Amino acid sequence: MITLTHYLLLSAVLFTIGLFGVLTKKNAITVLVSTEIMLNAVNLNLIAINKYVGADGIYGQLLALFVIAVAAAEVGVGLGIIISMYRNKESISLDDFNFLKW
Amino acid sequence: MVEFAMHNAWLIPLLPALSFAVIAIFLWPWPKASSTFSIIMILTSFVLALAVVYGVYTKPELIEKSLIYTTRWFSMPGLKVDVGIMLDPTSAMMLWVVTLVASLVQIYSLGYMEGDPGFSSFYAYLSLFAASMLGLVLSSNLLQMFVFWELVGLCSYLLIGFWFYKDSAREAAKKAFITTRVGDFGLLIGLLSLQILFGTLNITDLAAKAAHFQDFVSAGTLTLVLVVLFLGPIGKSGQFPLHVWLPDAMEGPTPVSALIHAATMVVAGVYLVGRILFLFKAVPTAMHVVAIIGGFTAFFAATIALTQTEMKRILAYSTVSQLGYMMLALGAASLTASMFHLMTHAYFKALMFLGAGSVLHALHGKAHIHEMGGLYKKMPWTTWTFVIGALAIAGIPPLAGFWSKDEILLVVKEAAHEAPGIYTPLFWLAVITAFMTAFYMFRQVFTAFFGPEKPENHPHEAPWNMRLPLVILAILSVIGGWVGLPWMEKGFGYWVRLGEYHHAEPNYLIMGASVLVALAGIYLAYLMYYKKAIDPDRVAERFGVLYKLSYNKYYIDELYLWFNQLVVDGMGKLLYWFDLYVVDGIVNGIGAITRGSGAVLRFTTTGSLQNYALVIFLAILVITLYFAFGDASYASLFLGGGK
């Protein structure tokens, strides 16, 4: 039997992996991809709860659709920023971007 | 006319106040106009005062129950203060004295201050003073009296320091104001305490409540309050230990000395105690304090006057001594004796000060009596009026001083029946002081006015406007005491009194003793300073230490100066250190802490976004854990129903 707990656990694990990537990776694009992983985890969460917790309606799936759309837009913006970063410094390693260091 | 004056007695202080304002704003460029306006105003007040006096002294019912006109000054929840005019024989007598001496002094100043660049402002200040003193005398509420009390103190400061370009005058003015301020602090505390305890500062209401004061306050507390309040009169009336400003106040022009420091302002303290004497009578210990301070001051100041050589200083210490007599009389629970002496003292002391002024005017400011001599030849009016004043103060009948001083001795003797431990020594002090008074006065008379002339002096008699007040005051010094002769049925003692009319038997023993003592003083002065039968310098040597103490005023000024430097300046230095190191230290410390913590915390800005994201994540974690496990109301939300 696949219960809600399985989905929630999977989503938690995915979220943690994504969070780890966001916090640790040096490559900016990798960070973006990790963000996508986090967002997908959240989508899983929403849909699973919508199915297993007995509320009327498809609001979980609806919100998941919104999140997909927003994620797509966000990636577009993020890539634009990365291109701008590259044009400034010839590199997209986040270690190089510490202008506000003391 | 009389009715008008009594209904509108508030005009009496108002006219001189108006004079002050008009001179200060408009008339000051024209000295003659200023003085004329001022004199017209004060003479009008004098006429009104005469009408009031006549009106009051034909209404015996005012003795028991004063005529009061009041109106509400301000009121707050729990506090109502009235302001008003109080007419009764005591205030009428004070009106007479103040307007009389003020008028005479203003006329005198026409001659004395002629040519002084500050002629107009002198008259402005004199008018302001007259207004303040008259306001004080007519006050029906103690708070109102306090306002005028401070005003007369201000006028005293302005007038003592009138010749402000003189260092000594400025210092003396400051000394006067600050010393009386010390006293006024006590007065204020006392007044506030009275307001809190009795709920009112109206004099008549206090009198009504004083009869059963135990309902409001315990005897001990009331005694303490009254003793603290008495500090004000100690300062203002020059009692020991706050007498130090009066002799220095002689730096002011002589008309000022005559008006303020002899006849009127300094008696404000005596008047205040007299007005609330019913409170003092309720707690005899407070009365004893008044009597002891008064008696001691009288004796103490007389011992200093014995050796002084400046004319006005001798008169100043004499004033302190006579004020001590007045306080002593109040301390013996006699409003009559005190007020009587106040009135006669005003006559002869103002007379003598104006006479001294005449001498100073003639000798261009020379004040040491040993540099004068034989003035009687060229200045007969001054000399003989001064002699009349001296005889009056010495207490030679039938002049005024004899009757009033005798009255004081009589009441002190009577008080000694009740509390001999206190009043018998005071009685003897008073008698010895009478001897000293006669002696030092005639020492001055014989040295300055009689004896050989000094060739370097070219005295001339005073102009008419200075002689007229001298003559008027001399006449009053002779007949002024006849309103209170002991054989009179309805004399001074009937009108000005507190409580039952106590018609004492004339005590011929005391009368005779005081005359003898006065004559002895005069005779000793005659021997030492006229006939030169006894050499004063040898006497001074014989008395060695005592002479030095007396001549240097018992070093009290030096003592106060030392105390001032030690305590006041010391406190100042201590508090300055505190302000510099502790207060500023704390303020600067806060700044230092900010800088220090900033220097450490800046290392948290690594510039790396991922570090910031980590911090945010950790914070969210902590908050979530707190709400899940720490706060029960949210636990159900996070954990799906219970821990």
Image (cartoon, coloured by chain):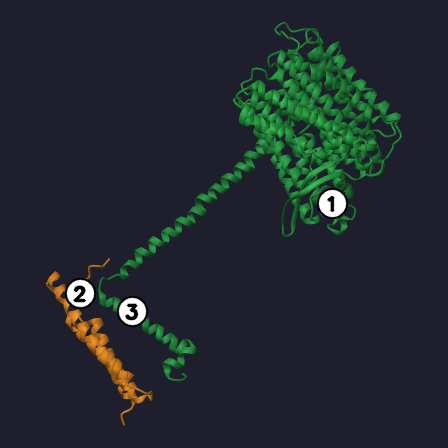
Q: Please tell me if label 2 and label 3 are on a single chain.
A: no
Q: Nearer the viewer, residue B244 or B385?
A: B385
Query: Residue at horizontal 32%, vertical 72%?
Result: B620
Chain designation of label 3: B
Q: Is residue B309 visible in this depiction of the protein?
A: no
Residue at disc 2, secondary structure: helix
Question: Chain drawn green, letter?
Answer: B
Question: Chain drawn orange, letter?
Answer: A
Could you give the CA–CA distance between mark 2 and mark 3, rounded to whole angstroms?
19 Å
Q: Which residue is mark 3?
A: B616
Residue A95 is tagged as 2
Could you give the CA–CA distance between mark 1 and mark 3, rounded to whole angstroms?
76 Å
Disc 1 or disc 2, which is closer to the eye? Answer: 1
Q: Nearer the viewer, residue B199 or B238?
A: B199
Query: Residue at horizontal 26%, vertical 61%?
Result: B605
In the image, residue B642 lies at what x, y percent? 41, 84
Residue A41 vs B103, above or below: the answer is below
**Viewport quadrant of the N terminus of chain B:** top right
